[in-house]
Amino acid sequence: MAEPAAPSSRDGLLSRRVAWDVLEAVAAGAYADVALDRALRRRSLAAIDRGFVTELSYGAIRWRQWLDGWLDRLGKVPARKQPPRLRWLLHIGLYQLLQMQRVPASAAVNTTVELAKQGKLARLAPVVNGLLRSALRAHEAGEQLTLPKEPAAALAQQHSLPLWLSRELLGWCGQDKAESVARAFNQVPPLDLRVNRLRSSSDLVAALLADHGIATTPISGCPEGLQVLEPAGDLRQWPGFNEGYWCVQDRAAQWVAPLLDPRPGQRVLDACAAPGGKATHLAELMGDVGEVWAVDRSPGRLQRVAANAARLGCGSIQALAADASLLGQERPEWNGRFDRILIDAPCSGLGTLARHPDARWRVTQQKVAELLKLQIGLLEGLRSLLAPGGCLVYATCTIHPSENTKQIQGWLQSHPELKLHSEQQRWPDPTGGDGFYAAVITAPEAV
């Protein structure tokens, strides 16, 4: 995906100030997407400037550890001992100098110094200027950070990962694959669309978008998938959006629903459905004939499911606010009722770090351990709802074996009557596609 252009001259300083606000909000505990949306809503910026803010703020968050490495090398005070407000401002300047090729070096340095003056860091403006100019000289000379000798520490420094994750990654898949996955973590993810087969076709949508100057290409392995080559503007204004011809869905997520092989007339349960991408995909694969129950604990998030279903014309979807792990107890009439069950389980999201830049700094081994209890609770609670001969798919958007293969192997040992039909672990791909895991499990036929 092409790098966004530099901001307009009128709003160049404001754009960088907004990005700085986002970094500070994330450091204080906000989620990056929420902080970005809130910051953009408070300002009136042109589309080119909004794109610049997104790349600058997400990029600086994503490359935090690598940027800290440059601060440690160039500054007199280590990055983690810098005043936080100064540290994030320096990240804003360094990211432009070292990663954003379209931003003139003079603009990166001068605006960062000016922000220091305006942002109650005036006495430190000479420090900001000196450090950024040192970074520019090092960059122009082709200098690189000196990496630690220990492989995990080197991987963490080079690709801006927490050390615990780089250690685990090397153990899971070895040096070469770990390098590939780490590169994927730091790519700006492509924009993938899923064409709604109920209302359109891939050829029609591709032609409609092309007529409006939006180029696409088919996605291998996704019959209804199109990758947008150079996204621009508000997607809601693109042709076919209001008509429900397509929705946005990463290619990895598009691979999940077909694993259930849903048939027209069946009863299907999507146990963790919001915001509705997989539930609507299931309805489309069924020709919108049958029942798709979209369950989620959050009534607010279920409103998004209903809105997406309405826009895409999926009348077979029924939304229910409930704890899916308790459905067998609270709705005993549902026991043995569903031909297909999808458990898109709450997980660490380690397969989606490219699109969630702050997640790598949030996820810890302790949080993974807590998620394991939620996942097994869903598996145990939903087992009784599966009809004889039915199919259950357990899916996650993580690459952590404890949440995936180990979780399923342990559960199946407790339920020998169930059979593992297939499982697959897809790793994040630098060319596009989040990491995900899916296990297809079948129940015995009725005797």
Image (spheres, rainbow, N blue to C red):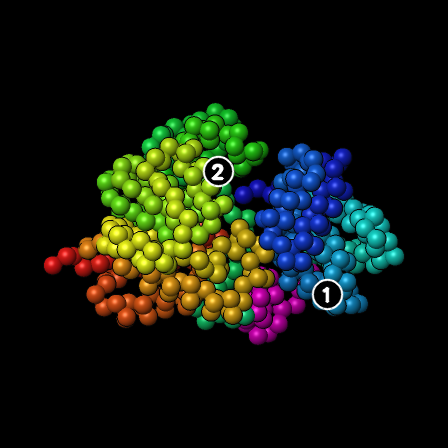
User: Going from the N terminus, do you reach mark 2 or mark 1 first?
Assistant: 1
User: Which residue occupies the extreme right position in the image?
Assistant: 123
Residue holding disc 1 = 79
Is residue 153 within the magenta segment? yes
Nearer to us in this view, 95 or 196: 196
Task: State left or right for residue 126 relative to residue 372.
Answer: right
Q: Is residue 199 left or right of residue 367?
A: left
Residue 244 point in image, percent of width and height: 42, 31
Q: Amino acid at mark 1?
A: Ala
In the image, is residue 150 above or below residue 302? below
Locate residue 314: give its quadrant: top left
**Tag 2 near tag 1, CB within 8 Å:** no
In the rendered picture of this protein, how many numbered marks are placed on residues? 2
Residues in magenta?
Answer: 143-163
| Residue farthest along the left direction in this orientation | 447
**Image point 65% across, 36% down: which residue?**
48
- Residue drawn at the location 51% of the way across and 48% of the way down: 189
The image position of residue 303, as x and y in percent, is: 46, 41
Q: Residue at x 77, y 55 (%)?
A: 132
* Residue bearing mark 2: 228
